[in-house]
Amino acid sequence: MGKNKLERFAENETFEHFFQPSFDDLMQGFPLKGKWNPDFFGNDNPIVLELGCGKGEYTVNLASKYPDVNFIGLDKKGARLWRGGKTSKENKMRNVAFIRTRIEQIEHLFGPAEVSAIWITFPEPQPRNSKAKKRFTSPQYIERFRKIIKPDGIIHLKTDSDLFFEYTLEVIKENGYKLLYSNPDLYEYPDDPRIKDVIAVQTFYEKMWLAEGCKIKYLEYKI
């Protein structure tokens, strides 16, 4: 393991807004489950999650733009999360938190209807059909999300993958979810006011895909 990673892991431990619960911690009962607003943020503002957030670009940038909304980024890679944790600490952002965890554990971290919206940004497409259940928009994951999101909560998906985009549209149709917006090429009409926040933030991976000529796709839907 590189020196930089070890240094980042050590610094993550010092961030008061950075959580790394173990499996045993979650099974015994995560203390902030159902209590994020009163016990951590100290307000009643909406909570928005960024799943598989990587370096936390959406978490940090949207939190800066919307100080009256609380943003929480989740990822299993501590070295990636370090960037978002450090930036938000340096900027003294009070509406940001990060959790190092697997997305499969999400229902142990949040209570019923505690989350107002979910962002899924450039997830692993899991191209093999045998691994379709591991896609973050699969019915199996949606059932996890249903346990924590408000009835009118919106799921946002941003991806470079044609397969993932088409798969999610199919899941939405087959399960009777409500499709709010679909765009197979965000940058074809970048002046569309509906996508201003979507294209205002470009993740590390998005910049890489754009440089390779990939089209960026976007969906909004309710479950």
Image (tube, rainbow, N blue to C red):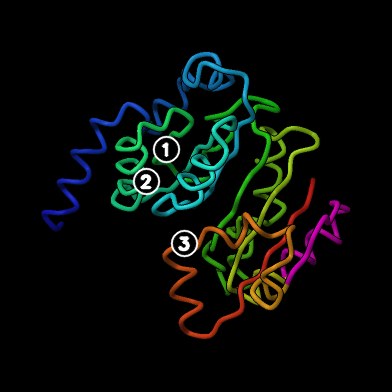
Q: Contact, CB < 8 Å: mark 2 with mark 1?
A: yes
Looking at the rendered image, the disc whose residue lies closer to the viewer, 2 or 1, is 2
* Number of residues whose C-alpha sits closer than 10 Å to that of mark 1, classed few (under 14), some (14–19) or many (20 or more): many
**Nearer the observer, 46 or 25:** 46
Q: Is residue 97 magenta?
A: no
Magenta segment range? Answer: 167-183
Residue contact at pointers 3 and 2, CB within 8 angstroms: no
Whether residue 29 is visible, yes or no, is no
Disc 3, SS: loop
User: Reading the chain from its start, which is encountered first: label 3 or label 1?
Assistant: 1
Can you identify the residue that label 3 sits on? 203
At horizontal 23% and vertical 30% (from top left) the residue drawn is 14
- x and y percentages locating residue 154 in the rendered image: 73, 45
Residue 176 picture location, percent across and down: 88, 53
Label 3 sits on what residue type?
Thr
Q: What residue would you read off at disc 1?
A: 98
Q: Which mark is residue 84?
A: 2
* Up-down relation of residue 84 to residue 17 (above or below): below
The answer to which of 78 and 59 lies nearer the viewer is: 59
